[in-house]
């Protein structure tokens, strides 16, 4: 009986704890727009301004989702993504949404090979990103 109660408590805790999203981008305007939109929907938002900081935060903070820019200083989004995929346990693939101004289809194909949840080209409508976040977190039926 005690196990069932503690399981219920853990489930309730998960329901009330906001999902944590790490935004890794060097453009302050994009970061602030994404942060405001996500926080308005109840997500906890962490921010990293370059690839190295993003990788360190992803490993330290264990976010539920990463929104990752492709082109950044110090370490590109692809290098961050490759490292995240190498270091994660097989039973939990961290959802990653890659955002980029790059038009190349080879980059999109490579991102998909690395199991990104979505690949969104800039400029994008914020609603498009928010729908992608909900899908990546398994919240299709989440209320607006």
Image: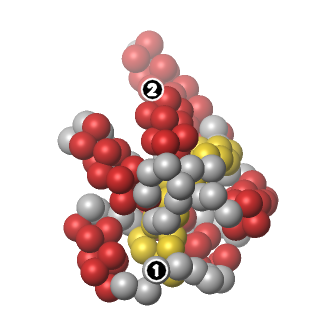
Q: Which mark is residue 47?
A: none
For this view, does 48 lie left or right of residue 106?
right
Q: Residue at x 53, y 79 (%)?
A: 101
Residue 112 x/y as whole percent: 29, 70
N-term mark: 1 or 2: 2
Q: Is residue 38 visible?
A: yes
* Disc 1 crowd, CA 10 A, few/some/many (<14, 14-19, 20+): few
Disc 2 on helix, strand or loop? Answer: helix
Which mark's residue is nearer the viewer, 1 or 2?
A: 1
Q: Which residue is mark 1?
A: 102
Q: Which residue is mark 2?
A: 7
For this view, does 89 lie left or right of residue 61?
left
**Residue 130 or residue 143, whichever sits in front:** 130
**Residue 75 or residue 17, whichever sits in front:** 75
Instruction: Indicate the quadrant containing the N terminus: top left, top right, bottom left or bottom right.
Output: top left
* Disc 2 crowd, CA 10 A, few/some/many (<14, 14-19, 20+): few
Residue 120 x/y as whole percent: 49, 77
Q: Are marks 1 and 2 in contact (CB under 8 Å)?
A: no
Q: Residue at x 31, y 45 (%)?
A: 83
Residue 143 x/y as whole percent: 66, 66
Residue 91 x/y as whole percent: 24, 41
């Amino acid at each position: 009986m005690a196990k069932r109660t503690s399981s219920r408590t853990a489930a309730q805790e998960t329901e009330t704890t906001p999902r944590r999203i790490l935004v890794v981008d060097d453009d302050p305007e994009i970061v602030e727009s994404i942060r405001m939109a996500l926080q308005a929907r109840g997500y906890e938002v962490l921010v990293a301004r370059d690839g190295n900081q993003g990788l360190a935060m992803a490993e330290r903070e264990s976010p539920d989702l990463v929104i990752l820019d492709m082109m950044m200083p110090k370490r590109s989004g692809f290098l961050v993504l490759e490292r995240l995929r190498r270091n994660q346990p097989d039973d939990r693939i961290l959802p990653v949404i890659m955002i980029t101004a790059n038009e190349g289809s080879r980059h999109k194909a490579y991102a998909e090979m690395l199991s990104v949840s979505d690949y969104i080209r800039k400029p994008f409508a914020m609603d498009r990103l928010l729908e992608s976040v909900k899908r990546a977190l398994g919240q299709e039926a989440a209320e607006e």
